[in-house]
Image (spheres, grey):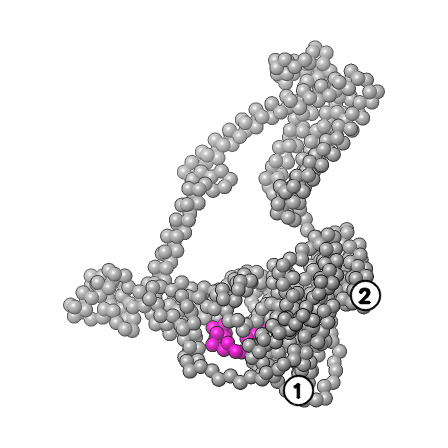
Amino acid sequence: MKKTHFTRKNFIVGALVYLYAILVVITGLALDANSPVFKANNPIRGLALNMGLTLGKDFAGSTQAYLLIIVAAIYIIITFSALLFEFRTAIYYEGKPFTKKWWIIYAVTFVVLTALGFGIGFSAQYAFNPDCIAGAFQMLGFSMLIALLIYLVIGTLVLAVVSIYINMRNIDKPFRFFKKSEEDKLEEKTEEELEELEKQGELANSFGEATDKQKAFADALRKAGLGGGLNGNGVGANGEGGDFDVQILGDKERVFPGLCTIDLAYQNGINDEFDEPEDLALLCEQFRKYLAKTFKIYFDINTIRAFISGMAASRFIILEGLSGTGKSSLARYFSDFIGEESFFEAVQATWRDRTSILGYYNDFSKSYNETEFLKRLYESNYRKSHVNIMVLDEVNISRVEYYFADFLSIMEYPMDAWKLRVMQFPFDFEAPALLENGFLKIPHNTWFIGTANKDDSTYTITDKVYDRAITISFDDRNDPFVVDEDVAQVRVSYDRLLTMFEAAIEKPENRLTEGDLARLKTITDYIYDTFDLTFGNRIMNQIEKLVPVFVECGGTKEDALDFMMSRKLVGKLTGRFEDYIKQGLLDLKSLIKKTYGSDAWKLTIHEIDKLLRRL
């Protein structure tokens, strides 16, 4: 359940408002000529008299006047608290607290609470003597005015003392007032740039790139016949007049041995032979039978269709469910079925950033620490006709949005911009063939498959990740079935698979009609209005690609929409326990049956029933 988060600044301001409300009550007591707490000649009453306020000698507060002041103090606190709560709610849920809608809410809240406080205060003036009522409200007004003056004076003194103390304590440090000054930001930026230049210089030196001074010294050594100098093997030359080594830039084979080995293996190209399947529906049926016949693994046909059509909608697919339900097997054996070999990488709990999968330059060994993940991506640029499946096993044992952040962002770009910087190369460094200016191209034939378990050892996958991926749930066990005929592998090229996807998407009969979109909008509008779950362009683009391919795989539009809605919207309600959720789910269930029929959208209804059981 989401909670509205308050900041320390909110509590500080709240405390100041609370102090003012208390000061109003104290001031009211002090202004009373017959106060049970203060003497008639107290300083606060003297201040009011000197200001010319018409207190009079017998200015005295009745019980009704004190009730009015107390009610006013209480409603000052209540009104501020309500406005602060609404302000933080606007920030937390929408990020925009000053829109027209929220200004109206603030104004209505202020007016309602002020009227309520006034009404209760007026009701406390029982007997309703006009003179008593006028005196009570006059006493309230004077109390609030004098309290404000005292509040400002005390606040100014406290602020001055605190300012002196803080500045004396930090007299040698740069001045900042909450936010960093422009000079501080400029100074930090300059320091960061200098540090970056130093790092680049160290990197160049670690590769053996000599400076002009070093080269001149080496030439002098060579002319003097003292040997060494700048040799072709990167061997240094030491002279008596210097305390440094001179080297040429290190060879690419020493820095990137694995990538250079791949360059060597593919220097003569690659011979490819593929089958040319024409029917996605038959491909799905054959794959399902292949799993059952060869590996005794059984899947529902719609799960196979969701997996194949999901590849058309996104390059990142998450297979989520309990351990042992066949998530890894589906990814592994699809590659086997099409004559390829999946790449498996077991995600580690220590992964925190991109270096965990892309590697890093090692200053000690003077080489790049190449990961198997990096080498597989690099090699796939040579194997452009092959479908490249890269599996991240237990993808949520660490936070996906940390180590996979670059991929999540880059795959939102057009394919031509699918490039990752591996490292910054020094000038004139001869890099491996496919590392252009230090960038690695993510091959277009690549899909990333993440398997995710649901247990206490894993992290919750965030909506940012879910929205970019196609997620397939593996919560149920499928019944086995018998396959009598022989089922052969089908060697499908990436180009052929992409062509079949594009052809399916272009078929008018496969695409959603205006009527289909209108019925879908009925459901999504209800979900948005009731649960505040958005249905953005990204999800709509995925639907426009997935639904036609799902239909071409032998499914129906309703089943495709059911699959997407169960994962993209209803699945996001997991973990929410607000009071309105249960009734909202019951009404959503009724709306689905009314819109699509009692037997439609079984996956979504199943998800709703699971949520209802938890409420």
Q: Would residue 46 be visible to someone looking at this image?
A: no
Residue found at the far right of this picture: 127
Of tags 1 and 2, the one toward the viewer is 2
Task: Give the percent coordinates (x, y) of residue 544.
Answer: 65, 65
Q: Secondary structure at mark 2?
A: loop
Which image quadrant is residue 519 in?
A: bottom right
In the image, residue 309 above or below residue 129: below
Q: Secondary structure at mark 1?
A: loop
Q: Which residues are magenta?
A: 375-394
Mark 2 = which residue?
597
Please give the label number shown on residue 240: none
Which image quadrant is residue 454 in?
A: bottom right
Amino acid marked by disc 1: Val
Residue 389 in magenta? Answer: yes
Amino acid marked by disc 2: Gly
Task: Give the percent coordinates (x, y) of residue 22.
Answer: 67, 28
Task: Give the percent coordinates (x, y) of residue 536.
Answer: 64, 57
* Chain-order first, disc 1 or disc 2: 1
- Is the residue marked by circle 1 packed among few (<14), some (14-19), or many (20+) residues within 10 Å? some
